[in-house]
Amino acid sequence: MPATPHEIFELLANPAMHAVIDGSGSVISAKDAAPKRLSQGATFSMDMKRGVQYKMTNTVVEFVESKQIGWRHFGGHVWRYILEPTTGGTTVTEQFSYGTSKSPLTLKLAGYIKGNEKAIRQTLTNLADYFVNKK
């Protein structure tokens, strides 16, 4: 990515920006009560849509300033971003870790695992585009 780990982390730690980079098309916006900046243990809710609108509440379970951030919701699986500085930017790894999921078989049968691969690729593209267009 053409940005520093700090710049990318600041974007990821701001729930209001998640809809801007979301590659799944399901994130609408952060709820008004969401914190402006996430921290370890923070909870935040997002308005979502997959066919119908719903709310998803997440808890930050991983937080290493400018290096790693991850959150999970009631399903138990974790969305994680790992940032590694490189010459001229940052390598960003986005992970959907369903090993801690309460129902990994349901996720697999419903097609979320495969669908998330596509969404992750698009999110990373959106993230790169955000910083290219910002500069």
Image (tube, rainbow, N blue to C red):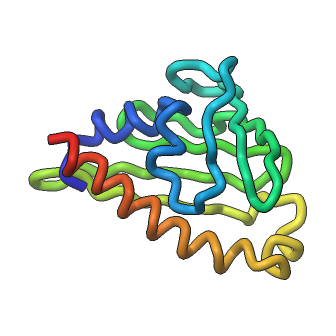
The quarter of the picture where residue 107 lies is bottom right
Q: Is residue 61 above or below residue 110?
A: above
Numbered marks: total: 0
List x then y, in percent, for residue 76. Answer: 80, 51
The quarter of the picture where residue 56 lies is top right
List x then y, in percent, for residue 3. Answer: 21, 45
- 71 relative to 117 in the view: left or right: right
- 108 relative to 85 in the view: left or right: right
Quarter of the image that includes the C terminus: top left
Q: Residue at x 77, y 44 (%)?
A: 73
Name the one closer to the observer, 9 or 64.
9
Q: Residue at x 77, y 58 (%)?
A: 100
List x then y, in percent, for residue 26. Answer: 65, 55
The quarter of the picture where residue 118 lies is bottom right
Name the one closer to the observer, 112 or 105.
112
Quarter of the image that includes the N terminus: bottom left
Q: Residue at x 55, y 51 (%)?
A: 80
